[in-house]
Image (cartoon, rainbow, N blue to C red):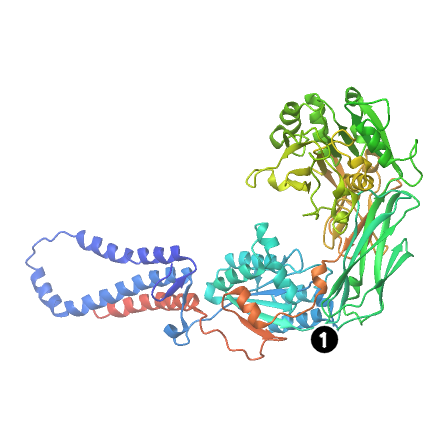
């Protein structure tokens, strides 16, 4: 309840006090109506004497009535706890404040501080000094801003020893910065505060790194429906006084690995596998003489020379590795040489992947032929495994069947199923294919003159609920003259991983291939429910889609609008046909290591077999220490879980002689220590706040807007009036 004099914490009690204050008046009026006047001659002498003192008696009664009403009103108002402006109180009352400390303990605060071993140590010392400076009647809450932000002390604590212990126990983490989440938690804490917004103070103690603000204010977070840090800070400034104290690192020179990834999902033995490493020079000077060492099981297997990097510059390096044995493998890239690194942990990046010794692909031929190079499956199997029984350096094992045989196949034994000009499939088979992809498998469809389009659209695509990537229109380019009636593949928009290799090969044979016939693939409209999961991989020069991809669960569905033999196109006769087929297989192959390459702070989860469920389940940490795993339900089975991967490096789940490998990496945005200026910060937040560099002033003036609480003052006055009322009643009675 806000009034002209201020506001109440419990307005209901204030209204109740005002209502009960009228009770003495009502009782007084009722008592006057209880007596009936009866004339009596002897009373006339007494009335004459009474009239002489009636004015004094009336004043005494009114004074006592006023005191009794005031006692009740003060009790109600005191319990309602009013806050009034300092100007109206002239120094009376107590100006209590709720202080919320937001403490940055992200990875970037590990950089050396100006006067401390790390920026975080300086931040922690500032927080302790602030706590010591607060009046004992002021509640204090603490929130940490490392991702994901967390509340350390939610309810405002008055115990300074408890607050100090909580802050002293904080340590810098390897996690990213979650300013948006920290501001959201501060808003939740303040909603539970009993003090008005004018008596709330939020202090952000953080480094001055720009990436924490700019990343959080970017479109990625807002597209996910999560407000940016700047938006949250603006909301917070409306609910409390916002103070930002920025701490600068002693040195900002930092060289880091921001990406280490594999360029193909299909990683097999004796198969050269592409990898990519991205290096960022997050310092204010150029660097030379840096090398990137690639380690496998602690042994250097490749060394790359990093080109000279300007200040703020980055470079992407690509290389290939060939594995001699299958199974889960750990790879690590380390930067050596160059500038002095203020954050050594981000000079390394880790990757775990599965190397397959035998990649099984099922080719379903709907129009088989006696000659190998007449059927679509013949061209595909030759591209995948040139030798009759496969090739020593090609781990793919294609198996060719006809469409009636597909019913008896166990889909889980294959990574990819390819339909080659298959006429039709039963409803149950389409449903099995969709389930196969939801579990991580892949489906590739090559069309042809044998395909029943109506069945594919009705059962295969099923309005976006089925196994196909898209629906099919009519057939195009039916001209009889192959020398003139054809279309080519477009050289534009070659960003998809399947065709990205051809982007700088404009004269390659892929773009010389002639397509005489193809099926029109129907792209979804932008407002369709499944539009976000469908992507065009390659187009023809007339704009029609040539290859379309759709993500289904954990898997992928790809549709090629022409044939894999020479019936509709001469592409199989071109050298790039083999590269395109391998790119399709490498992209669509079930991704090994899904959920096992994580960011620091993530939960690690390993699926358990029945034998592992009853065995000892442990996680081996990067330090070599062991931690017991939590066994939790996961779908229809169980999984071993580690609450948080708190350090970068390799982890392993061990149980019943089986190991599952994990890799935990830093948030790459944490390595850029470039500062954010006050002008840019004010523009981002767009709300009033105070900003200080390195530390709050020792004798900072208290906010003049803070209101003072009068609850105890009113209760003291009510207590005095309770003592005064019977004394006055006795004193007045002596003179009646």
| Image spot of residue 104 (x, y percent) | 65, 65
The foreground one among 273 and 540 is: 540
The foreground one among 631 and 375 is: 375
| Image spot of residue 609 (x, y percent) | 81, 35
| Image spot of residue 572 (x, y percent) | 80, 35
Residue at coordinates 21% horizontally, 70% vertically from top-left?
A: 735
Decide: is 709 above or below 422. below
The foreground one among 722 and 605 is: 605
Q: Is residue 411 left or right of residue 188?
A: right
Decide: is 197 above or below 575. below
Q: Is residue 371 left or right of residue 33?
A: right
| Image spot of residue 431 (x, y percent) | 69, 26
- Estimate how packed mark 1 is, as few (under 14), some (14 to 19) or many (20 or more) residues with alpha carbons within 10 Å: some
Decide: is 510 above or below 730. above
Q: Is residue 214 left or right of residue 409?
A: left
Q: Which residue is labeled 1 in the image?
A: 250
Residue at coordinates 71% horizontally, 25% vertically from top-left?
A: 449
């Amino acid at each position: 309840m806000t009034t002209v004099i201020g506001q109440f914490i419990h307005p209901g009690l204030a209204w109740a006090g005002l209502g009960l204050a009228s009770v003495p008046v009502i009782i007084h009026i009722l008592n006057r109506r209880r007596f009936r006047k009866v004339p009596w001659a002897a009373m006339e002498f007494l009335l004459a004497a009474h009239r002489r003192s009636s004015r004094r008696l009336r004043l005494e009664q009114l004074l006592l009535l006023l005191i009794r009403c005031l006692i009740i009103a003060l009790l109600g108002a005191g319990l309602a706890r009013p806050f009034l402006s300092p100007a109206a109180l002239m120094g009376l009352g107590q100006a209590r404040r709720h202080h919320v400390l937001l403490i940055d303990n992200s990875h970037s605060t590990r950089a050396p501080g100006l006067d401390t071993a790390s920026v975080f140590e300086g931040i922690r010392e500032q927080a302790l000094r602030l706590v010591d400076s607060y009046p004992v009647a002021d509640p204090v809450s603490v929130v940490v801003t490392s991702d994901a932000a967390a509340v350390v002390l939610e309810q405002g604590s008055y115990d300074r020893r408890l607050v100090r212990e909580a802050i002293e126990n904080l340590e810098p983490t390897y996690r990213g910065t979650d300013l948006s989440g920290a501001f959201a938690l501060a808003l939740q804490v303040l909603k539970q505060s009993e003090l008005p917004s004018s008596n709330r103070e939020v202090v952000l103690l953080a480094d001055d790194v720009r990436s924490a603000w700019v990343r959080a204010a970017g479109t990625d977070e807002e597209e996910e429906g999560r407000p940016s840090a700047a938006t949250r800070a603006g909301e917070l400034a409306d609910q409390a006084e916002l103070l930002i104290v920025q701490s600068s690192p002693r040195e900002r020179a930092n060289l880091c690995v921001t990406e280490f990834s594999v360029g193909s999902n299909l990683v097999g033995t004796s198969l050269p596998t592409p990898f990519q490493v991205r290096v960022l020079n997050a310092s204010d000077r150029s660097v030379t003489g840096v090398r990137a060492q690639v380690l496998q099981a602690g042994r250097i297997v490749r060394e790359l020379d990093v080109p000279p990097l300007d200040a703020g510059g980055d470079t992407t390096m690509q290389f290939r590795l060939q594995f001699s044995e299958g199974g889960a493998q750990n790879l690590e890239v380390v930067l050596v040489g160059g500038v002095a690194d203020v954050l050594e942990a981000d000079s390394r990046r880790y990757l775990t992947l599965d190397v397959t010794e035998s990649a099984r692909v099922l080719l379903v031929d709907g129009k088989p032929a006696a000659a190998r190079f007449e059927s679509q499956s013949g061209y595909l199997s030759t591209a995948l495994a040139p030798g009759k029984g496969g090739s020593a350096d090609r781990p793919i094992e294609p198996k060719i069947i006809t469409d009636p045989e597909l019913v008896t196949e166990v889909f889980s034994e294959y990574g990819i199923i390819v339909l080659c000009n298959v006429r039709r499939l039963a409803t149950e088979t389409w449903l099995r294919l969709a389930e196969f992809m939801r579990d991580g498998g892949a489906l590739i469809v090559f069309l042809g003159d044998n395909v029943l389009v109506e069945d594919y659209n009705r059962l295969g695509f099923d309005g976006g609920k089925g196994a196909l990537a898209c629906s099919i229109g009519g057939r195009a380019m039916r001209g009889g003259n192959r020398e003139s009636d054809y279309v080519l593949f477009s050289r534009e928009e070659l960003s998809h991983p399947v065709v990205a290799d051809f982007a700088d090969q404009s004269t390659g044979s892929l773009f010389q291939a002639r397509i005489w016939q193809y099926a029109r693939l129907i792209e979804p409209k932008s407002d369709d429910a499944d539009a976000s999961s469908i992507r065009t991989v390659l187009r023809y020069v007339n704009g029609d889609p040539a290859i379309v991809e759709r993500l289904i669960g954990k898997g992928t569905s790809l549709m090629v609008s022409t044939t894999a033999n020479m019936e509709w196109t001469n592409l199989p006769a071109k050298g790039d046909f083999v590269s395109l087929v391998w790119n399709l297989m490498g992209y669509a192959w079930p991704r090994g290591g899904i959920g096992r390459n994580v960011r620091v702070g993530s939960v690690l989860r390993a699926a358990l077999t029945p034998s592992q469920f009853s065995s000892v389940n442990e996680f081996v940490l990067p330090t070599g220490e062991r931690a017991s795993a939590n066994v939790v339900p996961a779908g229809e089975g169980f999984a071993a879980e580690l609450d948080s991967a708190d350090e970068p490096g390799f982890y392993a789940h061990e149980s019943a002689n089986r190991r599952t490998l994990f890799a935990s990496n830093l948030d790459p945005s944490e390595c850029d220590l470039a500062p954010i200026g006050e002008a840019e910060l004010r523009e981002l937040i767009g709300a009033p706040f105070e900003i200080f560099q390195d530390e709050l002033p020792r004798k900072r003036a208290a906010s003049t807007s803070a209101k003072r609480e009068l609850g105890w003052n009113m209760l003291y006055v009510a207590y005095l009036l309770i003592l005064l009322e019977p004394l006055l009643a006795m004193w007045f009675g002596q003179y009646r």
